[in-house]
Image (cartoon, grey):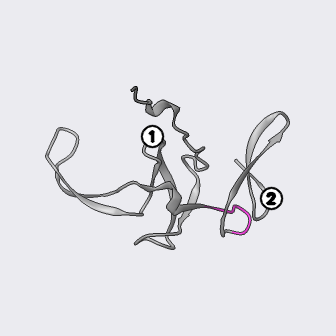
Amino acid sequence: MTKKSNKSRFAPKIHIKKGDRVTVIAGANKGTTGEVLEVLPKAYRVIVEQVNIVKKHQKPSNENAGGIIEKAAPIHISNVMLVDPKSGEPTRIGRKKVDGKLVRYSKKSGEIIK
């Protein structure tokens, strides 16, 4: 009997990109809005500015003095929703071809997201 590798498993397409404005729709930070600082596609998580702030004890080094620092921790991508650029409300994202290129668009307003 052979084991299947994880490479054959389905990985959903990530609709959020770095720099997007998102709002948190679930969890302790529900209702908070912020910009995506980093996307972690393998873990299916995002780091959003000023959301899920945790305290981290850091050793002193040449770059920083150390001590207790506050930093944004990753949250699951299913707990965030893109903010519609037109209305400012959370919206789902669709994909369509425009001039031969696949672009993201807001399902609420139909506006193309850059």
Which residue range is magenta in the image? 82-87
Q: Quadrant of residue 85?
A: bottom right
Horizontal side of 1 relative to 16 (left or right) equals left
Q: CA distance from mark 2 to mark 1?
A: 29 Å
Horizontal side of 67 relative to 104 (left or right) equals left
Q: Quadrant of residue 21?
A: bottom right
The residue shown at (74%, 64%) is: 86
Amino acid type, mark 1: Lys
Task: Determine the residue located farthest toward the right in the rendered image.
Answer: 99
Horizontal and vertical percent for residue 34? 51, 62
Task: Classify mark 2: helix, strand or loop.
Answer: loop
Main secondary structure found in the magenta portion: loop
- Between tags 2 and 1, which lies in front? 1
Horizontal side of 37 relative to 113 (left or right) equals left
Horizontal and vertical percent for residue 77? 50, 55
Q: Which residue is mark 2?
A: 110
Disc number at residue 26? none
Disc number at residue 42? 1
Amino acid type, mark 2: Gly
Task: Classify mark 1: helix, strand or loop.
Answer: loop
The residue shown at (40%, 26%) is: 2
Q: Say which of 48 and 12 sits in front.
A: 12
Q: Quadrant of residue 52?
A: bottom left
* Label 2 Cα crowd, 10 Å radius (few <14 / some 14-19 / many 20+): few
Horizontal and vertical percent for residue 12? 58, 45
